[in-house]
Amino acid sequence: MTAPSPAAGRTDGTDGTDRRDGRDGPDGRDGTGVRDRHDGLDRLPPPRPAYDAHTWKEIVYLLLNLPVAVFGFTYAFTVLVAGGTLTLTVVGLPLLALCLLGARQLGKLERARARKLLGVRVEEPTPLPLSRGGGPVQRLWLALKDPVGWRTLLYDAIRLPWGVVTFCTVLVSLFVLWPVLPYLARFLANADRAMVRGLLSPSDELERRIAELESDRGIVVDTAAADLRRIERDLHDGAQARLVNLAMGLGLAKEKLLEDPDTAASMVAEAHGEVKLALQELRDLARGIHPAVLTDRGLDAALSSVASRCTVPVAVTVDLPARPAAAIEGIAYFTVSELLQNISKHSRARTASVDVWRADDRLLVQVRDDGRGGARLDAGSGMRGLADRLGAVDGLLVVDSPDGGPTVVTAELPWRDRQE
């Protein structure tokens, strides 16, 4: 028996090493299909950065807090002290207003910095309407009461201590606490995000509501002025003219009373007819201001009275648990009255209906007709004016009127309980 040769366990060569001569497969195996023991799990993972880009942006933001806070605090302190002192002079208020406009620009830069480095999406506030603010005094007052400028000054005034804390904490952590710096930076940056959102973000809902109230106030003033002009015109051209003619006729009748009693009697009879017409015009005018039936008996009777004067048959259904506030009741009445007038003049309808009911905290009024349709809010017929009047009290007017009909107009008003 002969011992095995030492070369028997070698694949090639004489030094006992595994040589493949470039015959490895694509999966790290050699030509015989044997996997290399140095491949696979023994390899190191690829290198990765310790901090990602988002973390570095937060660190940069926190380090910039100190110089930015020093500048902002200096600006706010100067504005408050100098502006408050100089308000005793004639230049104080204009200077303070100008500084508040400058504070708006500082807030804009801070929002841009937070948006770029922290990813905070904060909308820009609405610009001040200085161009339509009236005279110099109105524009000055508009700038002085700007809440965005005052909130920016408050933001700059409280940022100095926070800027010192964040700058020192991050700077020391870069050299001492660098393993936990990403977590610390995220915590501090979240506090910055909260301050930016709380003090530099616009109060969209409040600004929208203020704009709506300003617009509604203008609509109410314009509507009241138009109503006063209409009443004055109706009195001047109608009842007042008839009363003047009545006075002249009675004067002539008085002069002829002794000379020609028959002529005087006929003139008195004519004057009596003029009195009746004047009274009727005064009743119609009073009904246009506020009908007595609405005050005494409510919407059901008042709308039935309006429907009886329409040129087409109108079915009225009022389902209300109680009477709403007098102002809401009056707007609902005049809305239906205007819509029924439009039906009489423009719709060519054969029938119409009026439905009034309450849904939660809203009063709903719906007027239907089977006319030719084509009604639009921007096509005249008083629709635009109705929509503006309803909008002035947080109401809504919806018109569904395809060409060929039918037309459905829905008015929605806020419900307010009646105060007896």
Image: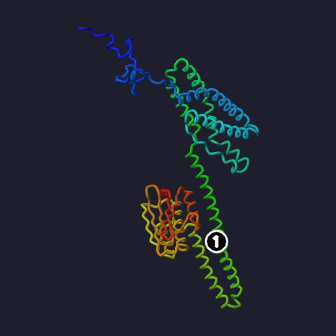
Quadrant of the image occupied by residue 89: top right
Furthest-top residue in view?
A: 2
Q: Secondary structure beneath disc 1?
A: helix
Q: Position of residue 315 (x, y in %)?
A: 44, 71
Q: Identify whether 260 is placed above or below 239.
A: below
Depth order, front residue of 131/411: 131
Q: How is the image coloured?
A: rainbow
Furthest-left residue in view?
A: 1
Depth order, front residue of 407/207: 407
Can residue 307 be seen here? The reply is yes
Quadrant location, the N terminus: top left
Q: Position of residue 413 (x, y in %)?
A: 50, 58
Could you tell whether 46 is left or right of 11 in the image?
Answer: right
Q: Residue at x 68, y 33 (%)?
A: 80
Mark 1 neighbour class, 10 Å CA radius: few under 14, some 14 to 19, many 20 or more: some
Residue that badge 1 annotates: 234
Depth order, front residue of 75/67: 67
Can residue 291 be seen here? The reply is no
Q: Position of residue 54 (x, y in %)?
A: 53, 30
Q: Position of residue 356 (x, y in %)?
A: 45, 64
Could you tell whether 234 is left or right of 354 in the image?
Answer: right
Furthest-front residue in view?
A: 1
Q: Identify whether 308 is placed above or below 50.
A: below
Depth order, front residue of 356/67: 67
Q: How many marks?
A: 1
Q: Residue at x 37, y 16 (%)?
A: 12
Q: Identify whether 176 is placed above or below 360.
A: above
Looking at the picture, which amino acid does disc 1 mark? Asp
Could you tell whether 148 is left or right of 319 in the image?
Answer: right
